[in-house]
Amino acid sequence: MLISRRVFIMLMFSLYLWNAVIRYPLINGPHVADGFVLMRFAFVISNFGEIPWILDLSSYLGMYPFSEPMGIPVLLA
């Protein structure tokens, strides 16, 4: 059974809208531990003006052992 192009486009559009509805958060602000960690990193960066836990240039990308990527906290600060 073949479906028409119009039905297919409407089906894809409805799936897209349903996906957007399901993924929309119901609460504002950070609500997971990672969000609070990123906010704490940004707070330390903006208050001290430096990133004390950066040990190497590869630490900025999270490629140094036991390091965290610092791109988002630096942008937030």
Image (cartoon, helix red, strand yellow):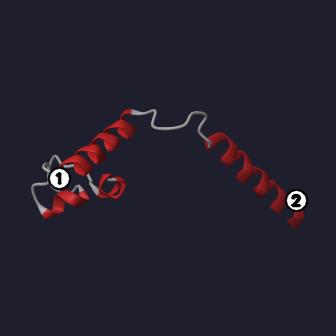
Residue 24, quarter of picture: top right
Quick check: marks 1 and 2 in contact, CB under 8 Å?
no
Task: Please report the residue visible at 14 percent of the width from the left and 64 percent of the height from the top.
Answer: 57
Residue marked by disc 2: 7
Report crowding for label 1: few under 14, some 14 to 19, many 20 or more residues within 10 A (C-alpha).
Answer: some
| Observer able to see residue 4 | no
Which one is in front, 59 or 43? 43
Residue 52 image offset from top left, x and y in percent: 13, 50
The count of marks equals 2
Taking 63 as reference, is 42 above or below it?
Answer: above
How far is the residue under mark 1 from the one under mark 2? 54 Å
Residue marked by disc 1: 51
Q: Quadrant of the N terminus?
A: bottom right
Amino acid carrying mark 2 in the image:
Val
Taking 30 as reference, is 5 above or below it?
Answer: below
Q: Between disc 1 and disc 2, whose residue precedes?
A: 2
Task: Please report the residue visible at 23 percent of the width from the left and 50 percent of the height from the top.
Answer: 45
Which one is in front, 18 or 34? 34
Amino acid carrying mark 1 in the image:
Ile
Residue 50, quarter of picture: bottom left
Q: Is residue 9 left or right of residue 59?
A: right
Residue that sits furthest to the left in the current view:
55
Label 2 SS: helix
Residue 61 image offset from top left, x and y in percent: 25, 60
